[in-house]
Image (spheres, helix red, strand yellow):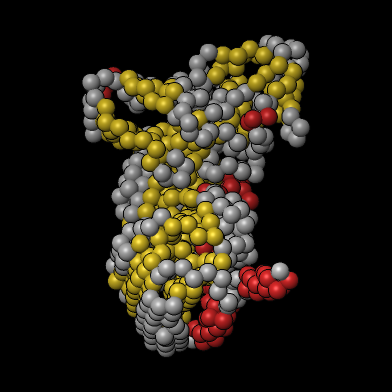
Amino acid sequence: MKTIFQTLIVVSMVAIQALSFAQAPPLGTAAGFVLFSTTGAVGNSGISHITGNVGTNSGSSTGFGNVNGVMHDNDGASAQCSADLLIAYNQLNSTIPTFFPSPLFGNGQMLNAGVYAVSGAATLNSNLTLNAQGDANAVFIFQIQGSFSTGVNSKIKLINGAQACNVFWKVEGMVNMASGTTMRGTIIANNAAISMNTGDTLEGRALSTSGAITVDGVLAYIPVGCGAPVLSGPAAPALASTECYAIFSSNGAVSNTGVTHVTGDVGTNVGLAIGFDPLLVTGTIHPIPDVSTAQCAADLLDVYTALNLLPVDIELLYPAQFGNDLVLTPHTYLLNAATVFTGTLTLDAQGNADAVFVIKINGALSTSTRSIVKLVNGTQAGNVFWKVEGAVGIGTYSLFVGTIVCNNGALGALETGVILHGRALTTTGALSTTEGTITMPPGCCNLNQVPVNTQVTGVVGSGESTCKNATQTITVAGNGTTFQVQNGGSVTMIAGQNIRLLAGTRVNYGGYLHAYITTMSEYCCGSTSGSYAGINKVSETIPETGAGTSFRVYPNPTTGIFYLELPPSSGNANAVVQIYGMAGDLILKDELSGNNRFEFSLAGKSPGIYFLQVRYGDRLESKRIIKK
């Protein structure tokens, strides 16, 4: 019995020692590469979407379009990556295995953390699930002493805290991923090639100590987590007074044609601002230069200078191919020529809501029809900046996001149906809009702000009194004053009464807009004299926007159900309705006919702003919907 007991102790100690070696290897600078070969060509065919550096230390990288990373061929960075890759390979190769599975992985198999060794070639078919059992630091190492291949549409799935950054595949032979494969983890092929085929996804890295790497129409990106730095991008420029302008030219005419909705100030410091309907502008229209426009012109120059001086992290090498489903992360980017934006661009903050994106274009910028800037994983419109050295033209029905700072060029075409969640600003040049929607991001420096969900309330006294929450004071008119309300009717303030203003409520007093809650997170307050910048002068009775000539949406704001009513002039024409979220995602698309009043629902959708586009007859119009 004693001998058996001693044997068990020895076996247990060996097992514990082996488990202690299941540690992630130090990748060093190789951690920043998504595709790399120490010796061998790295090539792409088809449209691939790559996030991470790409390169080789002996060979060349060819066939790639815009890469969200830096290309390093035969330079200091590739030499360092080569050295770091060898260190990582040696550690993986010397790690003591704890499990010896069959060479056929997948087919519904589930594995826990550990070191898995296969004595020859291995394959992956169908689904393989890696289960961290609640341990976010769990490490999975696969040592394959031969080639490694995957079947069509095979997938690695991660559950219970497993992370791709903690998964490693050391392969002593060629790696070949069949089309549709979803691979997770860092692959290091020793003295062999790596091939990825159409429709493959790699959350990890494909690295070879000596061998070619070829990819064809793939999505490959370096994993996040495991202590990797959180991307925050550059410091955002101080906007100062430009923060309150949605549309502005320091030197040039500003004009509008058709029904355009604007949230933010409109103006120019040299020339005239014309064609904007005050009823459709939530902000101040500066038709001629004044003190505010002079200050904005000075501040805009500072904003431009700050953006211009930012050091560049990544150069996108193919400006004529910009967009096309490219995904960018928080960085300062450069396109060193005139840029053509086609299709969709996704900005991924990777969960950091404060992350900043700056895109610097040394040339003109034009977009295709229905181009879309899409925000994901916490990206905020107020943290996106475009610095353009030349003219800017945004194509019809496009959904664009960010503050555009155009230097010495016309911002000459925000075309029909364009939705811009940001600002259109130019240092010198004309600026024109046509039947669009321009919404300045929240945060105007001249406006008091309180969260709406604090239920702003207060008591009206006999004279001017205040409405307060814990941090803000909002002046309201005194006893017996009647206010017109945007959605119909009026509110009379009586001494001793509480008042409550909800999102979307616009209140008017004495010919001036007194208070307007523009979004679910912003409260704007102006004095009864209209002295606050950003508060729009309006008529005492506020009619429904465009009644009789444009479609109506009501109630707006809505708690879920709202109605769309086409104008009588439409003659019950067929209509195509599309609803977009703030990130540019299509929420709903519907074709309507046989009536002029329709019911829709945003039930189940998060509170916030949504954009409605309606095409009927030969018209296309846009409106905002606020969901409470």
Residue 511, by quadrant, is top right
Which residue is at the front of the view, 617 or 56? 56
Q: Is residue 509 above or below residue 402?
A: above
Locate residue 478 relative to residue 21 in the image: left or right: right
Can you give x and y, in whole percent of width and height, for residue 423 in the image?
50, 48
Can you give x and y, in whole percent of width and height, for residue 314 in the image?
49, 70
Can you give x and y, in whole percent of width and height, for residue 287 in the image?
49, 40
Q: Is residue 445 visible in the rendered structure shown here?
A: yes
Which residue is at the front of the view, 485 or 267? 485
Quarter of the C terminus within the rendering: top right
Q: How many marks?
A: 0
Q: Is residue 340 visible in the rendered structure shown here?
A: no
Residue 596, by quadrant, is top left
Q: Is residue 595 above or below residue 199?
A: above
Please report the residue visible at 54 percent of the width from the left and 44 percent of the height from the top. 441
Residue situated furthest front in the rendering: 1
Which residue is at the front of the view, 462 or 387? 387
Please report the residue visible at 73 percent of the width from the left and 17 percent of the height from the top. 460
Please report the residue visible at 74 percent of the width from the left and 27 percent of the height from the top. 468
Residue 471, by quadrant, is top right
Quarter of the N terminus within the rendering: bottom right
Can you give x and y, in whole percent of width and height, for residue 237 in the image?
61, 58
Which residue is at the front of the view, 507 or 122? 122
Locate residue 475 relative to residue 579 in the image: left or right: right
Please report the residue visible at 68 percent of the width from the left and 26 percent of the height from the top. 456
